[in-house]
């Protein structure tokens, strides 16, 4: 692997030497801004934006005669945005800057004064709620009315192709995903990641990106792809930002406050974000199944579980970019949280005959108190070797530490219906701690080749060490005694060395991207209690190809193909048992193997908004929850295991409509056929399951006079199968109203969510002697009231976004 990294370094030098004399592929743009009477408007903010994603390319102010010029703008497809206090924002037509059009003079842009036609409906252009292209789907949350009062997890449930299973794990088309926040992964996985998403307020989210075919620049982890949650950021010069506050009433009241601030000067940019909240929530579970006895009879077991969860989050991010000169930037970024999660789980397990009063009931009370904190540090250096040509190199050094401390206590007793007496009281207590240390270095290079080509290359190395300690105590004669056979110490070490190269080329109306990523993984997992020691070392190649062909101004087609890997989460490898109650527990699997997926997508786009996508994925060794039933103890044991293979065929439709000037409708439909194959762990006989599933959603936005807006969102997810699990249909309806005032700097949103009361998982787990009915409810009707206020001057440029070196490892910690 060292040879690969050395070769990559030589590639950097070789590219620099060979291409130093290339011609700059840049042009010039000039234009004039006037008011509605044709008079020049000086000091107007003018921005060049990329037509593909509206990203800012460069900003200037008009002169005293209203003129403005942009020098050395790289060839591309752009539009102009012009704004000034007291005037409506205006946009130019799109235009192309290339070798044939190096100097462009645009038509005069006229700005109309605010306050004109106050009684008319004020229609402001905004991005559709859902945008889609080959390999990428974007949910624009920032302007959504019904997002207020919801969490990141709530919003992900509504994303096309995203599913949240009965344990509230997030998957994409039934496959695991890498979850990122602002291009950086959390230091959590499993339950801890779910808790973080539950405490991330929707008011702090700008958009959610779903990348089903990421380029080789990204870590290869995540079979389903990458979900990147982009938070709101300050985008202005001077000191500016926004604050948000939300009150929510459901079974319990909860609150959240968040905000960001940005201070930008010519020499530095200082920025920060914070989130703080208290989120109590009720969860109910009902598990029912039949257990065969030795005499051939069966016992019906139904577990009724009531759970009150409470999440408290305190998150802070602060960073600074220092502009050494116009070509060099050095940045530091620190973020962390100090959160807590606690719950009380009341469970009664009824044992007897089906449709008859129970013979006995096991009553249990489980209490959990978790405290987890994290600190992550990033040092970044970026140098632009050629401002006009776009040649640049960046370096990242990262350090992260995650700590989790847990105290769990389970008390239960058996109630005998015949004697009406409680007997066999039992109590167990577990104390545990987890620490994850992550260190990483990475370097990235971007280098244009000719007029329409670009090379991106880089290398990364990461070192991860996790330590898990778990003490198991049982109540014996009034005092707790250690149970050494059930306690455990589990250590895991993993080193990953990676290198990648991506080549992009535009050939007339065709865009081509070819990429290859190579990863060498070395890992060791050791359980000191069981004596298990699992070592692995493997090298993988992950090719990636994307081709986009523009047929004409209204039609284009695209192809995307990639290979990806999903490594086990660190906690999934720990062979220790975690208890929900006496009859339900989870056990890790130290022999769990990584899963691999091969993905192919073909998309057709009409008028840059109507899209149909065909997608196929083949997953080998898919990691998924598997439940076995021990008839002698009546316990169900959940663990992760590898399925042989999974095939998923999908067709997706993106259909945005503009019915009137004031009514827009974003509609999505996703039809898929899923087929699973795995072997019986006892007989090794092959087992097949398959089904056809579809998901339909519609978000309708109605813009009213006086800055009012109404949003209605609904979805339907048909019955589905996922491994050994079968789920019933899910559907719901959400309603929101928004009012803007104080020159549109203040916004009040009122929303009513889960109107149909179907935010739940109802289904079954079926395999061999297991036939378990499942009904989990985690959300009830909610009324949300939120207030946000933004302050600052005209938009110029946002704080730098960067993907740190620990991005992949963060998602697996916990």
Image (cartoon, rainbow, N blue to C red):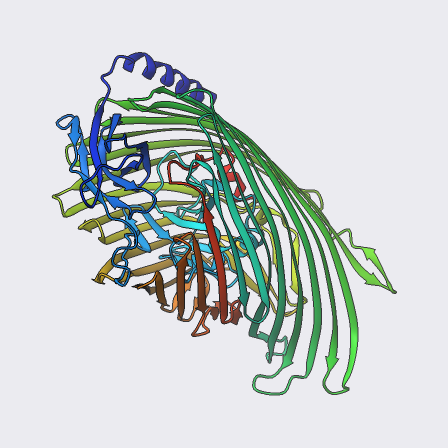
Using the image, determine if residue 751 lies above or below residue 807.
below
Pick whichever, 508 or 38, lies toward us. 38
Q: Which residue is drawn at 45% across and 46% down?
A: 232
Pick whichever, 67 or 638, lies toward us. 67
Q: Residue at x 41, y 62 (%)?
A: 146
Pick whichever, 551 or 55, lies toward us. 55
Q: Position of residue 534 (x, y in %)?
A: 59, 40
Does any portion of residue 623 appear in the rendered image? no
Q: Position of residue 131 (x, y in %)?
A: 30, 51
Using the image, determine if residue 283 lies above or below residue 402.
below
Q: Position of residue 208 (x, y in %)?
A: 40, 50
Q: Where is residue 209 in the image (x, y as percent from the top left)?
A: 38, 48
Left or right of 212 on screen, residue 343: right
Residue 103 picture quarter:
top left
Residue 217 picture quarter:
top left
Using the image, determine if residue 103 lies above or below residue 633.
above
- Total marks drawn? 0
Q: Residue at x 20, y 33 (%)?
A: 31
Left or right of 305 on screen, residue 673: left
Does any portion of residue 18 appear in the rendered image? yes
Residue 797 picture quarter:
top left
């Amino acid at each position: 692997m060292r040879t690969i990294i050395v070769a990559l370094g030589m590639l950097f030098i070789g590219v620099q030497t060979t291409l130093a004399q290339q011609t700059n592929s840049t042009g010039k743009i000039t234009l004039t801004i006037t008011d509605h009477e044709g008079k020049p408007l000086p000091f107007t903010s003018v921005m060049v934006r990329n037509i593909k994603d509206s990203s800012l390319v460069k900003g200037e102010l008009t002169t005293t005669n209203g003129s403005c010029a942009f020098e050395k703008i790289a060839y591309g497809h752009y539009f102009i945005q012009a704004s000034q206090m007291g005037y409506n924002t205006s946009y130019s037509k799109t235009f192309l800057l290339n070798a044939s059009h190096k100097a462009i003079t645009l038509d005069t842009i006229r700005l109309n004064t605010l306050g004109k036609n106050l009684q008319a409906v004020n229609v402001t252009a905004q991005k559709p709620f859902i945008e889609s292209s080959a390999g990428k789907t974007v949910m624009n949350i920032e302007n959504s009315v019904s997002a207020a009062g919801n969490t990141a997890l709530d919003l992900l449930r509504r994303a096309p192709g995203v599913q949240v299973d009965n344990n509230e794990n997030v998957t994409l088309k039934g496959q695991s995903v890498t979850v990122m926040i602002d291009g950086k992964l959390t230091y959590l996985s499993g339950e801890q990641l779910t808790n973080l998403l539950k405490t991330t307020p929707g008011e702090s989210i700008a958009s959610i990106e779903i990348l089903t075919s990421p380029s080789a620049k990204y870590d290869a982890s995540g079979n389903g792809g990458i979900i990147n949650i982009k938070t709101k950021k300050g985008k202005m010069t001077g000191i500016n930002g926004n604050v948000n506050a939300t009150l929510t009433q459901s079974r319990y009241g909860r609150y959240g406050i968040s905000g960001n601030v940005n201070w930008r000067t010519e020499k530095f940019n200082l920025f920060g974000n914070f989130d703080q909240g208290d989120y109590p929530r009720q969860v109910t579970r009902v598990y029912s199944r039949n257990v065969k006895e030795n005499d051939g009879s069966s016992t019906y077991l139904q577990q009724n579980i009531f759970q009150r969860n409470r999440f408290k989050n305190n998150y802070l991010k602060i960073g600074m970019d220092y502009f050494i000169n116009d070509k060099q930037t050095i940045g530091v970024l620190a973020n962390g949280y100090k959160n807590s999660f606690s719950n009380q789980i009341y469970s009664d397990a009824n044992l007897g005959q089906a449709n008859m009063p129970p013979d006995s009931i096991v009553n249990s009370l489980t209490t959990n108190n978790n405290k987890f904190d994290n600190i992550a540090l990033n040092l970044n250096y970026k140098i632009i070797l050629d401002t006009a040509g776009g040649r640049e190199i960046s370096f990242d050094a990262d350090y992260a530490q995650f700590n989790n401390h847990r105290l769990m206590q389970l008390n239960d007793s058996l109630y005998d219906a015949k004697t009406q007496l409680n007997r066999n009281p039992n109590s167990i207590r577990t104390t545990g701690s987890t620490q994850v240390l992550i260190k990483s270095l990475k370097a990235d290079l971007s280098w244009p080749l000719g007029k329409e080509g670009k090379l991106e290359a880089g290398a990364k190395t990461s070192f991860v060490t996790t330590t898990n300690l778990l003490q198991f105590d049982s109540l014996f004669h009034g005092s707790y005694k250690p149970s050494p056979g059930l306690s455990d110490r589990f250590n895991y070490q993993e080193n990953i060395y990676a290198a990648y190269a991506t080549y992009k080329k535009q050939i007339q109306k065709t865009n081509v991207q070819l990429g290859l990523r190579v990863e060498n993984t070395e890992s060791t997992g050791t359980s000191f209690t069981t004596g298990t020691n699992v070592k692995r070392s493997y090298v993988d190649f992950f090719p990636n190809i994307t081709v986009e062909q523009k047929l004409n101004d209204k039609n284009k087609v695209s192809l995307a193909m990639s290979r990806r890997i999903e490594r086990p989460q660190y906690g999934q490898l720990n062979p220790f048992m975690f208890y929900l109650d006496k009859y339900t527990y989870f056990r890790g699997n130290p022999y769990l193997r990584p899963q691999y997926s091969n993905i192919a997508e073909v998309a057709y786009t009409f008028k840059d908004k109507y899209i149909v996508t065909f997608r196929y994925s083949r997953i080998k060794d898919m990691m998924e929850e598997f439940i076995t039933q021990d008839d002698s103890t009546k316990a169900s044991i959940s663990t992760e295991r590898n399925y042989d293979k999974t095939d998923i065929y999908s067709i997706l439709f993106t259909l945005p409509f503009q019915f009137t000037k004031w009514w827009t409708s974003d509609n999505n439909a996703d039809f898929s056929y899923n087929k699973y194959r795995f072997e019986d762990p006892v007989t090794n006989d092959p087992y097949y399951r398959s089904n056809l599933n579809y998901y339909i959603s519609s978000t309708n936005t109605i813009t009213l006079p006086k800055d009012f807006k109404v949003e209605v969102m609904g979805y339907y997810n048909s019955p589905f199968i996922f491994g050994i699990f079968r789920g019933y249909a899910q559907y719901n309806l959400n309603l929101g109203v928004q009012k803007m005032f104080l020159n549109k700097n203040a916004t009040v949103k009122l929303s009513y969510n889960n109107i149909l009361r179907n935010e739940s998982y109802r289904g079954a787990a079926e395999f061999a002697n297991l036939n378990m009915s499942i009904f989990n409810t985690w959300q009830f009707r909610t009324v949300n009231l939120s207030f946000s206020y933004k302050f600052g001057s005209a938009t110029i440029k946002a704080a730098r976004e960067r993907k740190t070196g620990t991005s992949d490892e963060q998602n697996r910690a916990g």
